[in-house]
Amino acid sequence: MGWWRIGTDTMAGSSFVLSPLAETVASLKTLHAAAAAHPGERAWLARHLPAYRERLAAEPLDALLVRAAIGPTWNADFLTPTPPGDRERSFEEEVGAVLATEPADAVDQLAVAIGGPVPEPLRSARDLPQRLAGVLGWVWRETVRPEWARRRRILEADVTARTALLSRGGWAAALDELCPGKMRWLGDGRLQVNTRDYPPRRVDGGRLLLVPVTPATGWVSWEGTERYAIVYPCAGVLADTTGPMVPEALGALLGTARAGVLVRLGTPLSTSQLVALTGQGLGSVGRHLKVLLDAGLVRRGRAGRSVLYEWTEAGAVLVAAQEDPRPGAPRGGGRSL
């Protein structure tokens, strides 16, 4: 597994950062994989994947470059520059780091991402940074910027929820919940950043930036010893653009807000994820979960340091019954996840 040893000074200077470029890179990776993690992402792919493929078909060298830069295991560094972290930058400001890459350095970074020789058309090209910036610019303009306001609200809700978790459980708890199953706090200043075989890295004396993105992907990056970044999928990736609808009868029985928590627990979620998805406060979500636990409608369990909630059999039956109260009777407004 890959892990970082994080010094106390670095931990103290850690912060959450929103990055339009990271959101764009994550969206590019989703388009490249052509695989959706949830219904909202599936609808987004249906809208944009044909135009993306047409864009690359018109520029075969760009298509080859994207495949190489994303790589089978590692990303090329100039695809995923570490955000400055001093303030939120515009996409145009951030993409300057891609453009500033020396062509020879870009080829070397592609070799690392590919894990072998770089194809000749890419080795001979002198404009790889400009080409990659052009692809990223297209993804930003055509697929991310039109809905950036909505994505930004999801990202801000995630940061708010995790900041609350940080205040209650410290950085160990906040880091442990970023990517359950892949990232976890090992103790003694050690953070597992992925499950791959990679030498440990000492992260000390610089800043640690936590960068949420809405697509279901993530990566780590660093800029010398000054800045380190963990890009992680925020809780919003679990929802589509509207979220599951609360059946009217269930809302009348439990209250709309409490029912809104219950209907989302068909898959295990943490308290911080529920805060981000519902838009409710941490205290409100906690109270709703206690009532649902006491009623036997949900149960909780641990995944590492994370506490996750999900339906019991009784909870699943109740939600299903309210969605379709009569056997065989069709009804709109079912769960969309």
Image (spheres, rainbow, N blue to C red):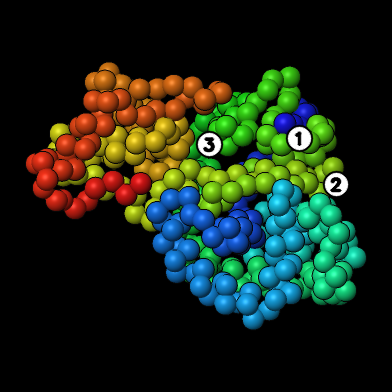
Expressed as whole percent of the image width and height from the top left, the position of residue 27 reads 57, 59
Q: Is residue 79 visible?
A: no
Q: Is residue 154 left or right of residue 255?
A: right
Instruction: Tell me the CA gap for discs 2 and 3.
Output: 27 Å
The outermost residue toward the right is 104
Q: Is residue 286 above or below residue 123?
A: above
Say which label, 1 or 2, has the lower sequence index.
1
Q: Is residue 244 above or below residue 301?
A: below
Task: Please tell me how crowded label 3 is: few (under 14), some (14-19), or many (20+) other residues with Cα within 10 Å.
Answer: many
Q: Secondary structure at mark 1?
A: loop
Amino acid type for the residue under numbered disc 2:
Gly
Q: Nearer the viewer, residue 208 or 231?
A: 231
Residue 107 picture quarter: bottom right
Residue denoted by label 3: 162
Amino acid type for the residue under numbered disc 3:
Arg
Amino acid type for the residue under numbered disc 1:
Asp
Q: Which mark is residue 282?
A: none
Say which label, 3 or 1, has the lower sequence index.
3
Q: Secondary structure at mark 3?
A: helix
* Residue at 52% across, 25% down: 303
Residue 89 picture quarter: bottom right
Instruction: Tell me the CA gap for discs 3 and 1.
Output: 28 Å
Q: Nearer the viewer, residue 140 or 299?
A: 299
* Residue at 15% across, 43% down: 324
* Residue at 49% across, 69% down: 48
Residue denoted by label 2: 224
Instruction: Tell me the CA gap for discs 1 and 2.
Output: 21 Å
Residue 19 picture quarter: bottom right
Question: Exactly how many numbered labels are in the figure?
Answer: 3
Residue denoted by label 1: 197
Q: Is residue 324 above or below residue 188?
A: below
Say which label, 2 or 3, has the lower sequence index.
3
